[in-house]
Image (cartoon, grey):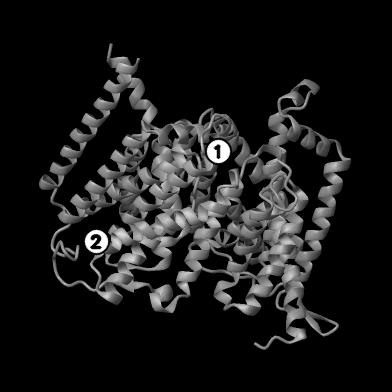
Amino acid sequence: MDNNFTARRRRELMLAAFLATVAAIVPLFVKDVYAQNIMVLTLMYAALSQSWNILSGYCGQISLGHALYFGLGAYTTALLFTKFGVLPWFGMLGGGLISALIAMGLGYPCFRLRGHYFVIATIVIAEIALLLFQNWNWAGAALGIDIPVRGDSWLKFQFTRSKLPYFYFALVLACIAWFVTWWLEDSKWGYWWRAVKDNPDAAESLGVVVFNSKMGAAAVSAFLVAVGGSFYAQFVSYIDPESVMGFQFSLLMALPAVLGGIGTLWGPMLGAVILIPLTELTRSFIGGSGRGVDLIVYGSLIVLISLARPQGLVGLFSRQRKAVSP
Amino acid sequence: MSLTAETIIQSLASGLLMGLLYGLIAVGLALIFGLMDVVNFAHGEFLMIAMYVTFFLFAFFAVDPLLAAPLVAASLFVFGAVVYLLIVRFAMRAKANAGMVQIFSTFGLAIVMRGLAQFFFTPDYRSITHSWLGGKTISVAGIFLPQPQLMGALVSIVAFAALYFFIHRTDFGRALEATREDNGAVALVGIDKNRVFALGWGLGAALVGLAGAIMAMFFYVYPDVGASFALIAYVTVALGGFGSVFGAFAGGIVVGLVEAVTALVLPPSLKSVGIYAVYLLVVFIRPRGLFGSM
């Protein structure tokens, strides 16, 4: 049993390494800019959803306000760079740390709430931040921030000629988010989180420090999402409050994990790989009419998948694997 | 704007009217949640549909929104019941991640409804230009009250009173209460749970339909209009306490007044901040809202 478990963990790690290698080779053959753009977004959402999954999937504290941390990451990087000339790499780290601290500060009162009261609190807090940023003149208010492009460099993390550097960074980010999840899954924290998710009262009585484990999950999750936000700011080089902190974004971040399999290691990745290209393709091929057909397709898909596979699409694969291996 | 006694009383009065209307928008959500623990993430889109039905009844048949209100409520009743039978019934069967399945199946429905509205009605902003009450005000002791909002407040009070009577004095109301207490045991006394749930969804949608008919008198109608009110409706219900239909009434009044007061002291674009802050304050002190029971 124990051996089996270790072997399965090792197999997962090898599978991830294999998939990452394949992913790294793909853009060398697929040179179409549009396709590369979709691949960057897919990896970014995979990373975000994986990070969201740590708090909401493993620890069971469903947050629909993670756009807050994404926005904080994006704004920290963009403001430090445009106002003080601080390199985006420091902004990325700074944004991550600020978000982790804020997540814990907010967690302090919020983690007493349960169920829908908690979910609504997360929505409302992100919404307050959105409104404040929209009215914060120094930070560009509702118009946002244009990040000046000063030529291609890794130091400034800006690339105009090729999307490849962004692609590889997003790949690394997705791998880190996956690896952190993989690593935490079998740590003391991972077990605590699942206990907290299943039954917080029972967990508490068995000696799990419920409050601290929620705080830990929130910090890790917020840090990673903020790094994703910093990346996004550099990638699009223009941010405004609605596009990085809007409620819609919180849902977009949660969707891949929910459709792929919430609280599972592979769910967010699988969900992102299916959902993001589909979203982008429907948007550009049938969304051009401006008549909402893309929304109809996209929404129907969400309804159908969530009704047909409540446990997520990832279940399809594990069953197949079981059937094949003796 | 200077803060004189008149401006304060004036904005408290209009805040109260708006608050009663918020209560009416939110009560359907509270009713459905109380009945079956499901939060309908398409609630704002129910409101949007109601506003469009009102608008088209006016545009094509010149039916005034006041006369249209019962018709709108009736059509939303059918719509709500159909949504339950076609989607929510199946979402309730999910063995895993029940909460997320409910959130995302109704959220997906919301996106589809917005898409359909864009497709059939275009993203244009529409408004009902001349209804009986539209644009008229009434003056009470020096305070000016817009007539559509005043009518909305009256409708809200009457609707809550009728709902109270309905839940406590009719057979269906008792079936509703019984199903909410224990939806397994009611089968033993011959109550069809699915029928009660479908009727609950119909009733919830009909109430937001009433609100939509009133709203269409003084607010623009467009495909995304629901999104602006949905969050306020969730906050209203949570503030009152999930599971309490009359919490929504109280929650609505609090939200309306807080919004009005915030608009006095902060720039108009920040008026929702007050609502959200008060929600947080209330649940930090009372984690189950003002009247929550669960």
Per the model, the C-alpha gap separating discs 1 and 2 is 38 Å
- Horizontally, residue B274 falls left or right of residue B149, namely left
Residue hosting label 1:
B99
Residue B191: x and y in percent read: 77, 27
The residue depicted at 57 percent of the width and 29 percent of the height is B93
Q: What residue type is labelled 2?
A: Trp
- Horizontally, residue B227 falls left or right of residue B206, namely left
Compared with B5, A229 (above or below) is above
Residue A143: x and y in percent read: 39, 74
Pick the residue in front: A112 or A207: A207
The residue depicted at 75 percent of the width and 69 percent of the height is B17
Compared with A263, B133 (above or below) is below
Please determine if labels 1 and 2 lie on a single subunit: no
Residue B134: x and y in percent read: 71, 74
- Outermost residue on the front side: it is A207
Q: Is mark 1 on a helix, strand or loop?
A: helix
Is residue A169 visible in the rendered image? The answer is yes
Looking at the rendered image, the quarter that the N terminus of chain A falls into is top left
The residue depicted at 50 percent of the width and 31 percent of the height is A195
- Tell me the crowding category of disc 2: few under 14, some 14 to 19, or many 20 or more residues within 10 angstroms, Cα based: some
**Mark 2 — on which chain does it sit?**
A
Viewer-side label of 1, 2: 2
Pick the residue in front: B112 or A4: A4
Compared with B180, A276 (above or below) is below
Q: What element carries label 2?
A: helix
Q: What residue type is labelled 1?
A: Gly
Residue hosting label 2:
A89
